Amino acid sequence: MEFEKLIARINELSRKNKTVGLTDAETTEREELRRQYLNNFKRNFRQQLDTITIVDGDGNDNIKH
């Protein structure tokens, strides 16, 4: 599911839960969508961390490969 659509659907279900409540199917869907969102977030964050290089004042890469 596209990221923006995923967030929109999670928000839609959250609003509905606050007003009229969710069916069992909708609760299950919301849990799965939240799981997908967190997995995407973790994967993207890990990719960002993997691109970071720590360099000392002399310009040397301090990460040992």
Image (cartoon, rainbow, N blue to C red):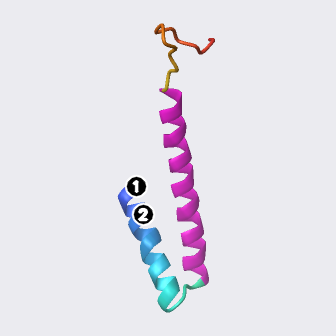
The dot on residue 7 is 2
Which residue is at the far front?
A: 57
SS under mark 1? helix
Residue 19 lies in magenta, yes or no? no
Query: Dot 1, how many residues are within 10 Å of its Cα: few (below 14), some (14-19), or many (20+)?
Result: few
Position of residue 38 measured from the top left corner of the image (x, y, whole percent): 56, 54
The span picked out in magenta is 24-51
The dot on residue 25 is none
Position of residue 28 measured from the top left corner of the image (x, y, whole percent): 60, 73
Amino acid at pointer 1: Phe
Image quarter in which the C terminus is found = top right
SS under mark 2? helix
Specify whether residue 25 is in view: yes
Q: Closer to the camera, 41 or 9?
A: 41
Rounded to the nearest angstrom, the CA distance separating label 1 from label 2 is: 6 Å
Eyeballing the image, is 38 above or below 32?
above
Determine the residue positioned at 42% across, 63% down. Answer: 7
Specify whether residue 2 is in view: no
Disc 1 designates what residue?
3
Eyeballing the image, is 42 above or below 11?
above
Eyeballing the image, is 11 above or below 15?
above
Q: What secondary structure prevails in the magenta region?
A: helix
Determine the residue positioned at 40% across, 55% down. Answer: 3
